[in-house]
């Protein structure tokens, strides 16, 4: 119940500009992204340029608590990039150029065009070390063996997508071709009659089928395809895409001579963590009248594959069927053979599909970030919500932590979060806070929330489902902030003097989560006592 007298006194306080004062510059999480291309893809405004991705999508995270810091590199000369002639082992990079390691970057995005051969062993080792230290990797090519050189032997990346054509070495799969009726063609007819290759540059996207996951009482898409109030169901279309797959062999080593597992077992023991297809595309286009490609044999195929390496103590990986989902020619129509094609800009204004696709790009950058950054994100979400209306008035300090009060606080937080963030992000928040603030002692619970535990029904009995645990975690986190930080954001700003005070924040979260887990235990105990009383009433 809100104390009305306190509420009236608080209303007299001058309003706070949350966008400027709530998350101070040094408190914003910094995600350092390296984007690497080879062959004919560059960072220009040309048709096969990535300027729309870099300057429009990754110029902002779309979130109030994180900044993307993007650097670009090209393995050849490149155009308008920060580091031409780039090598992952830094062997050819001049002293002033980018140095690839976990100290400088949190994730790397790979846009491969070159067809033949593979990365040298030293570069593969540098990428492997980066991934096993927690760095995230995104990779894509196109049909046939486009992208083979840079991507085809990188651990995990190599088995989550098809990179070889027309033949593949043992243990690898042959990719779809680019010209026959067996190609993967997602072209959707737009403003013009019939199917045309240049339909990829109009405002009509392809519809994808996201994989849905059951979390408590909700069905959610993967965080890569989640948005506030809904699900991302579109991608740019293209006449010959590549294919993402789930690997069948999880027992390979990362690279020759290195004994580390490519797919380690989950932290806390159990099975190896396996990649998942999180989106399906439909190949069903008719004859392309402008380039003479035949109608295709219709089928579905993997459009996006994701690997949650954090559950196994390594970096996350995401792969996409084609870089045409990211190029200027598909996003803004540059280079189309038809006059007037402007991609997803209609009358100079981006349409709804454009914003969903941009959100997918930003989701990649958020999801791939290492575990420490995930904790940084999630804490700031809760912090942001705590000093927002109406929670700034409704939450108050209390000394006795009971599960009913924490569930109430968590339910209020969840309602607030759902106004800005997706259900999948809220679910991720509970996992990250549990794993990040309390270490591996809660790994069994984290694995259960992630669907990895065969004991899920024992961990979540009928009256204690995932939603209850999530709400208790959220409630305990925010209550710890309420109890230990000042009441108003301008006062809270004075509590933190510099970046080193992150340790204070971690301590606040850890204490709250300990209390939250105690509340879970208390809830189970109360349920057990209730069951005994109920059985007594029944005469049992």
Image (spheres, rainbow, N blue to C red):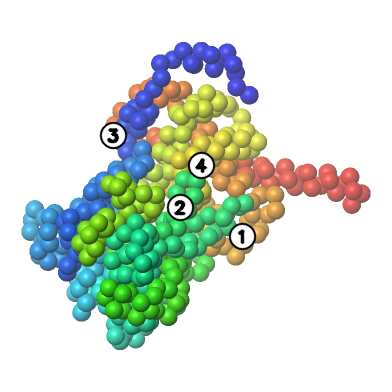
Marker disc for residue 280: none
Occupied quadrant, residue 192: bottom left
**Residue at image coords 49%, 16%:** 10
Q: Tell me which label, 1 or 3, sits earlier in the chain.
A: 3
Q: Are marks 2 and 4 in contact (CB under 8 Å)?
A: no
Q: Which residue is mark 4?
A: 418
Q: Nearer the viewer, mark 4 or mark 3?
A: 4
| Residue 377 image point, x, y percent | 39, 44
Distance between mark 4 and mark 3 Cα atoms: 25 Å
Q: Which residue is mark 3?
A: 25
Q: Are marks 1 and 2 in contact (CB under 8 Å)?
A: no
**How crowded is the residue under tag 3: few (<14 C-alpha within 10 Å), some, or many (20+)?**
few
Q: Nearer the viewer, mark 1 or mark 3?
A: 3
Distance between mark 2 and mark 4 Cα atoms: 12 Å
* Relative to 437, 214 lies left or right: right
Marker disc for residue 226: 2
Q: Tell me which label, 2 or 3, sits earlier in the chain.
A: 3
| Residue 130 image point, x, y percent | 28, 61
| Residue 341 image point, x, y percent | 26, 58
Distance between mark 1 and mark 2 Cα atoms: 24 Å
Q: Tell me which label, 4 or 1, sits earlier in the chain.
A: 4
């Amino acid at each position: 119940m809100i104390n009305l007298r306190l509420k009236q006194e608080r209303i007299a306080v001058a309003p706070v500009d949350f966008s400027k004062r709530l998350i101070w510059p040094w408190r914003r999480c910094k995600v350092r992204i390296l984007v690497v291309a080879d062959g004919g893809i560059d960072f220009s405004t040309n048709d096969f340029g990535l300027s729309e991705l870099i300057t429009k999508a990754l110029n902002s995270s779309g979130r109030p608590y994180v900044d993307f810091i993007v650097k670009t590199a090209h393995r050849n000369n490149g155009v308008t990039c920060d580091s031409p002639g780039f090598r992952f082992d830094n062997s050819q990079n001049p002293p002033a150029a980018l140095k690839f390691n976990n100290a400088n970057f949190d994730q790397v995005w790979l846009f491969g065009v070159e067809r033949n051969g593979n990365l040298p062993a030293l570069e593969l080792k540098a990428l492997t070390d980066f991934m096993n230290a927690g760095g995230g990797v995104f990779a894509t090519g196109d049909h046939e063996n486009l992208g083979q050189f840079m991507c085809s032997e990188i651990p995990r990346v190599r088995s989550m997508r098809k990179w070889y054509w027309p033949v593949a070495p043992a243990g690898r799969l042959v990719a779809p071709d680019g010209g026959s009726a067996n190609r993967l063609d997602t072209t959707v007819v737009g403003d013009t009659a019939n199917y045309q290759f240049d339909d990829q540059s109009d405002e009509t996207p392809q519809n994808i089928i996201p994989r849905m996951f059951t979390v408590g009482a909700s069905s959610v898409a993967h965080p890569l395809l989640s948005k506030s109030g809904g699900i991302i169901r579109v991608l740019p279309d293209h006449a010959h895409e590549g294919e993402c797959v789930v690997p069948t062999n999880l027992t390979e080593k990362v690279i020759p001579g290195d004994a580390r597992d490519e797919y380690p077992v989950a932290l806390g023991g159990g099975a190896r963590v396996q990649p998942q297809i999180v989106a399906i595309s439909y190949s069903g286009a008719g004859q392309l009248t402008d380039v003479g490609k035949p109608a295709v044999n219709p089928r579905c195929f993997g459009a996006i594959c994701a690997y949650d390496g954090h559950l196994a103590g390594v970096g996350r990986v995401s792969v996409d069927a084609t870089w045409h989902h990211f190029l200027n020619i598909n996003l803004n129509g540059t280079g189309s053979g038809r006059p007037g094609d402007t991609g997803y800009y209609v009358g100079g204004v981006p349409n709804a599909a454009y914003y969903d696709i941009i959100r997918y790009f930003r989701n990649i950058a958020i999801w791939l970030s290492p575990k420490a950054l995930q904790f940084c994100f999630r804490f700031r979400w809760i912090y942001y919500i705590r000093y927002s209306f109406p929670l700034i008035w409704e939450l108050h300090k209390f000394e006795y932590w009971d599960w009913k009060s924490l569930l109430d606080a968590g339910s209020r937080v969840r309602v607030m979060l759902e106004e800005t963030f997706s259900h999948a992000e809220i679910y991720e928040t509970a996992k990250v806070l549990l794993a990040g603030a309390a270490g591996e002692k809660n790994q069994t619970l984290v694995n259960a929330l992630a669907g990895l535990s065969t004991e899920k029904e024992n961990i979540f009995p009928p009256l204690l489902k995932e939603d209850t645990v999530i709400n208790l975690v959220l409630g305990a986190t925010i209550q710890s902030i309420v109890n230990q930080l000042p009441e108003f954001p301008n006062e809270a700003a004075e509590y933190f003097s510099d970046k080193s005070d992150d340790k204070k924040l971690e301590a606040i979260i850890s204490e709250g989560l300990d209390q939250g887990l105690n509340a879970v235990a208390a809830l189970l105990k109360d349920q057990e006592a209730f069951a005994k009383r109920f059985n007594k009433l029944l005469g049992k």
